[in-house]
Amino acid sequence: MSDDISQLKAAEKAPVKEERNRNWVAGIVLITIGLFFLVSNLTDFTINNWWALFILIPAVSNFGRAWQSYQNDGRLSRAVRGSLTGGLILTLIASAFLFNLDWGLIWPLFLIIGGLAALLGGWFD
């Protein structure tokens, strides 16, 4: 009976930890975006495609999910690789818009990221 109670207590605590991790990631993203706007208001630094900062929100969330999955699994599992690949692709897209990079130079990086994800899948499964 005491084992059942211990398991129920552990199950109750698990969602709270995940909620704290999500709040932490969201807080960091909002602080970073706010700092970009503050710097642009206080200096001559401007971001023409400021809306691309919002693409970084799901990217950071993917990186956080990859880290959490890695901590839970203790290895480079399919969930870690998927979240990491998604985060890298979204970061690349946001960087292209933020820094006005030429898409002709960027698109091969998507192939490289996909190829690395496939190689990691073959090695670690």
Image (spheres, rainbow, N blue to C red):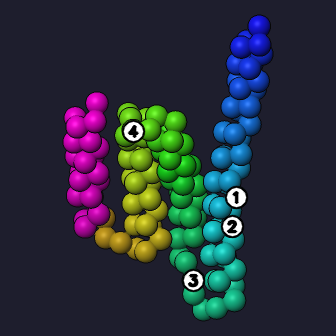
Left or right: 97 in relation to 107: right
Secondary structure that dominates the magenta span: helix
Find residue 88 and report its image quarter: bottom left
Please rate how many residues cluster around mark 4, counting C-alpha atoms within 10 Å: few if below 14, some from 14 to 19, many from 20.
Answer: few
Q: Amino acid at mark 2?
A: Ile
On the question of residue 84 being in view, the answer is yes
Residue 11 located left or right of residue 83? right
- 98 above or below 41? above
Q: Is residue 119 magenta?
A: yes
Disc ID at residue 31: 2
| Separation (CA) of disc 2 from disc 1 | 6 Å
Identified at 51% across, 42% down, the residue is: 71
The residue type indicated by label 4 comes to Arg
Mark 1 vs mark 3: give the one in front: 1
Q: How far is the residue under mark 4 from the one under mark 2?
A: 31 Å
Q: Dot 3: few (<14), some (14–19), or many (≥20) neighbours within 10 Å?
A: few
Q: Which residues are magenta?
A: 104-125
Mark 4 and mark 2 lie on one chain; the one further toward the N terminus is 2
Q: Are marks 3 and 2 in contact (CB under 8 Å)?
A: no
Mark 4, mark 2: which one is toward the viewer?
4
Nearer-N-terminus badge (1/3): 1
Q: Residue at x 22, y 42 (%)?
A: 119
Give the residue at x 25% y 48%.
116
Residue 70 position in % (x across, y down):
46, 41
